[in-house]
Amino acid sequence: MASVSIKVVYQNETFMQAAVKKKVQISEDQLKFINRNRNKGFLTVSWEKTGSKNLLKYKVSNMTSLAEYVKQNLTQEKYFELIRQIQRVMEVANDNNLDYDHLVLTDPKHVYYDVQKKKIGVAFLPMLSRDYKCANVVKFLAKLHKYANITVTDQGVMQKYVFFLNDYLKTKKSSVLTHNHLYNLLHEVLEVTLGTPSQIAAEEGKPTPADSSKTAAVGAEADADHTIVVSSGKKAECPAYLKDENNREFAIDHFPFTIGRKADNDLALTDKGTVSKLHAVITFENGTFYIEDKDSSNGTFLNNFAENSQRVIKEKLNSGDVIYIYNIPYVFTVNSIDSATVVVGESANRKKSDSKNSKSKNIAYLVNSSSNEKVPIFVYPFTCSEISGIVIGRENSRDRHSIYIENISCSSLSVEGSDIAEGSRESIFSGCNFLYHGIPFTFFEEN
C-alpha cells in the first residue's frame, strides 16, 4: 500500500495537506460530493497538482485537532457522542459508494473538531486509486481513548467499550470495522437509545419536523437513520464514588465494588502491571464503608503510600480518604446515603429515600483570572487536568486546618510571587493568588 504524507500548512488559512503520487487519478465527482456535504462530517477540500504530487488541502481554520480536544475534561456522554459522529461519517461514506480506506481515520491528530458547531471533520481522499489505505478505525479509536480525559458516569459501559477495543486489537487486527459494527457497539452493546426525528434533522442541517416531541421508535424506520443519543448516568444516585489523579469520577453503585486488572472488575485497571487480577473490594456493611485487600501482590494502602507502609487488610473508609491501589491513588467520596441507592449482592433489596437526590457541595474553588472560569473543589487532596502536576491538600490539627499547594511535577509554579520548586509545598489561604505556567488562578474557600 502506498503512503500518504500529511502535514499542517499555514497560508491565508490553515490547511491539513495530504500529498499523494502524481499519477493518482483524482475523482472530481467525489471531490464535489465531499465539499457539498461538510455538514455531514467531511472536511472541505481543494486540489492542486504539482510537478511531482497531487496535493489535497483540507480547510481546518478555527478547528482543533481531535487529539487535543479530547484532552479536556469530557463527560462520558460527550465522548461517545464524538464516536457516534465518526460512525455517522463512515455510514454516509458507505451509502454513497465512497471507499472506507480513503477516510483519514488512523490517528486523532488528523481528525478535526469545530467547537462552535460541535461537529467532527474527517478528511476523505477523493481518488480512484486502490493503492492507498488511510483508515484503521480500531487503531483510531484506541488512540482516541488513550488521549481522552473522561469523567466516567457509568463504569460498566466504559468497561464494555474498552473490552471491545482490546478484543479487536488483539484478535481481529485484519478485520474491517464497518459503520454497522460501530453502530451495533454503541446501540446494542452499550445499550444507548435512538434519537428523535428532530435530533436527526438538526444533525443533518435539515428543517426540523413539526412533530418533534415524540421519540423515534426502535424499528425499521429509526434503524435506517442510525442516529444515537447516549443515555446519561447520574452520580447523585450512587452512594459513593472514586476520583483519580485526572479528576475522573467512577460511580460506586453496588457492592461489593471490585478493583483489579481483569476487565470484568467494576474498576478495571487493565494496563497496570502492578495491580493484581482482583486487587481489592469496597464493601458496605451495617452503614459503614470498608476497603478490603484481596491478597494482592503489591498491596493496598490507605491515606499514605510507601512500599514499607502498613498494607490494608480491611479498613473502614471515610469520605475524603485516599485509597492507593499499590501506588495509584483514588479519592473516596461519600454521597448522602439518604439520597442514594445501595445495592449489596445480586438479589439484595434496594434502599431508596423519599428525599430528593443532592449533589456534593464544593468546599472550595479556583478562579482562572484569565477566563473567569470557576473550578470547584469537592474533596482534598484535589487534582485537576487543567492544572496537572500540582496538588491542593489540607492538613488538620485539632480544631484548625491549613491548606497547601504542592508542586509534584510542574515546571512553572509561583504563589504570591514566590517560585515553588518541584517537590515543595506552600501554604495558601482564601483569596491567595498563584501562577501556573503563567496562567493566574485565585483560591477561595467556601464559608
Image (cartoon, rainbow, N blue to C red):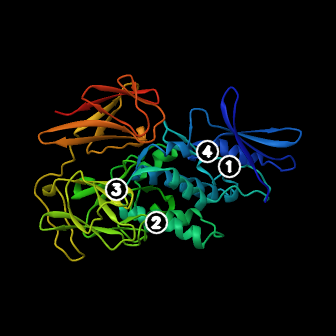
Q: Residue 400: x percent and y percent?
A: 15, 37
| Residue that label 4 marks | 37
Closer mark to the observer between disc 2 and disc 3: 3
Closer mark to the observer between disc 2 and disc 1: 2
> Which numbered disc, 4 or 1, marks the residue that appears first in the sequence?
4
| Residue that label 2 marks | 270
- The relative height of residue 224 versus residue 33 in the rendered view (above or below) is below
| Residue that label 3 marks | 305
Mark 4 to mark 3: distance in Å? 54 Å
Q: Residue 299: x percent and y percent?
A: 35, 66
Would residue 227 be found to the left or right of residue 214 on screen?
A: right
Residue farthest bottom in this picture: 347
What residue type is disc 3 on?
A: Phe
| Residue 320 in sight from this viewpoint | yes
Mark 4 to mark 1: distance in Å? 11 Å
Q: Which residue is at the front of the view, 120 or 166?
A: 166
| Residue that label 1 marks | 124
Closer mark to the observer between disc 4 and disc 2: 2
Residue occupying the point 47% across, 56% down: 227
What residue type is disc 2 on?
A: Thr
Characterize the local packing of mark 3: few (<14), some (14-19) or many (20 or more) Cα atoms within 10 angstroms: many
Closer mark to the observer between disc 4 and disc 1: 1
Would residue 20 be found to the left or right of residue 141 on screen?
A: right
